[in-house]
Image (cartoon, rainbow, N blue to C red):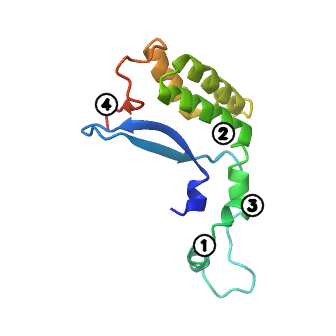
């Protein structure tokens, strides 16, 4: 993944997967799915198939696409700097063991998304649920990661 693409991914958590003791960060690309886009078509007067056009676009990839492509901008319209900043503060507090502080930030991030009729922010909800199941008390042996117990 290009460095420009990586800049548009949100770090969600640090986890160990079942059977491993190596913590690894996990990321997502925030995209608001409940919207309508124009149907993909080949350009007028083109003798290429839609698949050929899309393949050519992929071959001509330029990192500036993340800032200028109208579809990508539309997909990410809810990932505002304010939302991302709020979530990041929550994640930093969570990973460092300040779960009460993390709770406030994740609740706010979830509210920000819920205000957009999205059902809230799934990643915030998952971490809130995880911390709630431990009564908001960070374990004394917290290493800054969460073990996943199933595949």
Cα separation between marks 2 and 4? 28 Å
Residue 88 placement (x, y as % from top left): 60, 35
Cα separation between marks 3 and 4? 40 Å
Task: Give the residue at x 43% y 15%.
Answer: 134
On residue 149, which mark appears? 4
Q: Can residue 36 be seen in this snapshot? A: no
Q: What element carries label 2?
A: helix
Q: Nearer the viewer, residue 67 or 56?
A: 67
On residue 61, which mark appears? 1
Task: Give the residue at x 50% y 62%.
Answer: 1
- Seen in the picture, residue 22 relative to 120 is either above or below; the reply is below
Q: Nearer the viewer, mark 3 or mark 1?
A: 1
Whether tag 2 and tag 3 are in contact, CB under 8 A, the answer is: no
Cα separation between marks 2 and 3? 20 Å
Task: Give the residue at x 74% y 63%.
Answer: 68
Q: Earlier in the sequence, mark 2 or mark 1?
A: 1
Q: How many residues crowd mark 3 within 10 Å: few (<14), some (14–19), many (20+)?
A: few
Q: Which of marks 2 and 1 is in front?
A: 2
Whether tag 2 and tag 4 are in contact, CB under 8 A, the answer is: no
Residue 117 placement (x, y as % from top left): 71, 33
Q: Nearer the viewer, residue 7 or 38?
A: 7
Q: Is mark 3 on a helix, strand or loop?
A: helix
Q: How many residues crowd mark 1 within 10 Å: few (<14), some (14–19), many (20+)?
A: few
- Seen in the picture, residue 107 relative to 30 is either above or below; the reply is above
Residue 74 placement (x, y as % from top left): 73, 53
Whether tag 2 and tag 1 are in contact, CB under 8 A, the answer is: no
What is the residue that sits farthest to the left in this orientation?
19
List the residue tagged with mark 3.
Answer: 70
Task: Give the residue at x 56% y 77%.
Answer: 59
Residue 102 placement (x, y as % from top left): 57, 23
List the residue tagged with mark 2.
Answer: 84
């Amino acid at each position: 993944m290009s460095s420009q693409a990586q800049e548009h991914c949100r770090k969600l958590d640090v986890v160990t997967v079942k059977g491993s003791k190596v913590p690894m960060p996990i990321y997502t690309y925030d995209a608001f799915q409940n919207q309508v886009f124009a149907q993909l078509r080949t350009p007028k007067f083109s003798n290429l198939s839609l698949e050929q056009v899309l393949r050519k676009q992929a071959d001509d990839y330029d990192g500036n696409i993340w800032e200028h492509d109208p579809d990508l901008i539309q997909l990410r319209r809810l990932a505002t700097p304010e939302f991302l900043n709020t979530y990041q503060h929550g994640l930093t507090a969570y990973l460092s063991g300040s779960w009460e502080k993390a709770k406030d930030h994740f609740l706010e991030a979830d509210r920000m998304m819920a205000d957009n009729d999205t059902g809230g922010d799934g990643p915030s909800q998952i971490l809130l649920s995880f911390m709630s199941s431990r009564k908001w008390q960070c374990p004394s042996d917290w290493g800054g990661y969460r073990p996943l117990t199933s595949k």
